[in-house]
Image (tube, coloured by chain):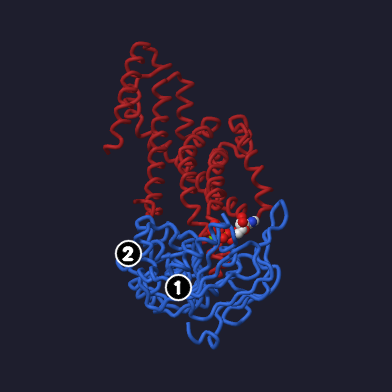
Chain colours: A blue, B red
Amino acid sequence: MNGEQNKKLALQFKNVDFHYRNAAGEIPILKNMNLSVADGGFVSIIGASGSGKSTIFRLIVGLEERTGGSIYLNEKQVADRPGKVGYMPQQDLLMPWRTVLQNAALPLELQKENHLDRGTVQNLLEAFGLKGYEDKYPHELSGGMRQRVSFLRATLSGSNVLLLDEPFSALDAMTKLFMQEWLLEQWEQQQSTILFITHDISEALFLSDRIFVITETPFTTLKEIEVPLERPRRQHDLDKKEVAELKNNLLEQFRMRV
Amino acid sequence: MKNYLYSIILITIFLFIWEAGARFVDTSFILPAPAEIAMKIWELKAELLLHHLPITLAVIAIGLGISLVLGIILATSMNISKTLEQAIYPVLITSQTIPIIALAPIFVLWFGYSIWSKVIVTIIITFFPITVSTFDGFRSASKELKELFQTLGASKRQLFFKLEVPSALPSFFSGLKVAVPMSVIGSAIGEWLGAQAGLGYFSRRMMTQFNGAGVFAPIVVLSLIGILLFTSVVLLEKFILKWRRS
Ligand SMILES: Nc1ncnc2c1ncn2[C@@H]1O[C@H](COP(=O)(O)OP(=O)(O)OP(=O)(O)O)[C@@H](O)[C@H]1O
Ligand SMILES: [Mg+2]
């Protein structure tokens, strides 16, 4: 993206350390890690299973406490991070006893400083293709719809930063392609910053401005790759020569590690 | 109605065998025939339904009511504090090893023939399934959802009312469905062991008079109460847990 230098940073890690602890001792995941994401960017994180992708998100939302360093959100160090970022966890996590509308509006109920009103929710429901489903329960929805409700809920946390942890991994291939295009549309309209975890290299290439690759664990930096594609994008853009080469390179890297 | 067809057939067959067996044995104070019992109920309907039934119903209602309050308070306390859980849980289990029948005469000594000796028996039998199932229900709240609430900045109170309570409801109702028939048994045992009125008491009095049909008549009424209460709980559950209907 042009003018990246002048842009504000939505998210920044400065020398962040983190390890899990279990009976056998410490499991280091982040070592003195640095990372920055420009405001309005779409960034994917890819890496092998267990490499620490979800851990990065858990640190950002405050579910795990870093052991060193600092994390900045919109260039401010936030002590009390809960409620400050929209987080869509790895599973869709809808509450079976709440309707679509009630599930989506959860942030409005829980966050004191959330000033979005029901009208906004109604409008967004329509934009998210959920109109007419407001009063349905989660088990009455398709997988793609459940993901959209979950994404809507993350959006309604009112933050400009959205963390999406493998949102489409459970969907069939067709639905997935459709949801990817839909997600880009939403992102362009809302001008939010999206961090997107995925295992799917094509998905990362299609969606992102930049891709962070976790090459080893624990990690200090993530390998950063610029995606050489203009927007708006179409799925067949992935067949372009330089993108195809990039994809093969990435695949090769992962193959070496397995 | 169709769902009950097979059980109705089964019960009918059972009643026929019983009727035949009773006529064959022909000692009605040991084995009264179903028809004889039905006739007895009809004959005693005023005494059973107007005099003894209200007293037993009061025992059931008060006992179940206190069990509900007690069970929910205990389950909530154990859910809130690990220390309380460690303190209460073993006591809870121990309370269920008490042989109530052996202890009931003592309740009669304490409370006399008042309603409270029967209520206590009912409470001891029914609060356990309610407490344990509600507590398990609280704990069944998914860890991932808890974390999601946390990331949205939910308070402890919000977490409890908006996540833990709804998560506990299905399990709570399962416990209630176990407790309701047991409350009928509890009231009957209580009255059997010391009372001056009530269906359990009446059954026992008939026993001393070798009136077989008279023993069974109030028992049939008790069992109908149990079925009725159980059905009400199922309906209430269906209404409250609408989202489970697919
Ligand atoms: N609570 C925990 N205690 C101890 N170790 C943990 C804990 N949570 C995760 N880990 C370990 O930390 C590592 C990183 O986990 P993480 O969930 O971040 O991986 P991931 O990259 O998101 O994997 P996946 O692609 O499978 O979701 C894994 O090896 C995992 O076993
Ligand atoms: Mg993960």
Residue type pointed to by label 2 = Tyr
Residue at 35% in and 56% down? A140
| Above or below A52: residue B233 | above
Question: Which numbered mark, 1 or 2, is in the foreground of this view?
Answer: 1
Residue A25, x across and y down, in percent? 73, 55
Front residue of A39 and B53? A39
B239 left or right of B76 in image: left
Alpha carbons under labels 1 and 2: distance apart: 18 Å
Would you name the residue on which mark 1 appears?
A: A155
Of pointers 1 and 2, the one earlier in the residue sequence: 2
Q: Quadrant of residue B229?
A: top left
Q: Quadrant of residue A10?
A: bottom right
Front residue of A104 and B183? A104
Element type at mark 1: helix
Residue A160, x across and y down, in percent? 49, 78
Q: Is residue B146 visible?
A: no
Would you name the residue on which mark 2 appears?
A: A133
Front residue of B190 and B227? B227
Q: Is residue A7 visible?
A: yes
Q: Chain of mark 1?
A: A
Element type at mark 2: loop
Q: Residues within 10 Å of mark 2 (few under 14, many from 20)?
A: some
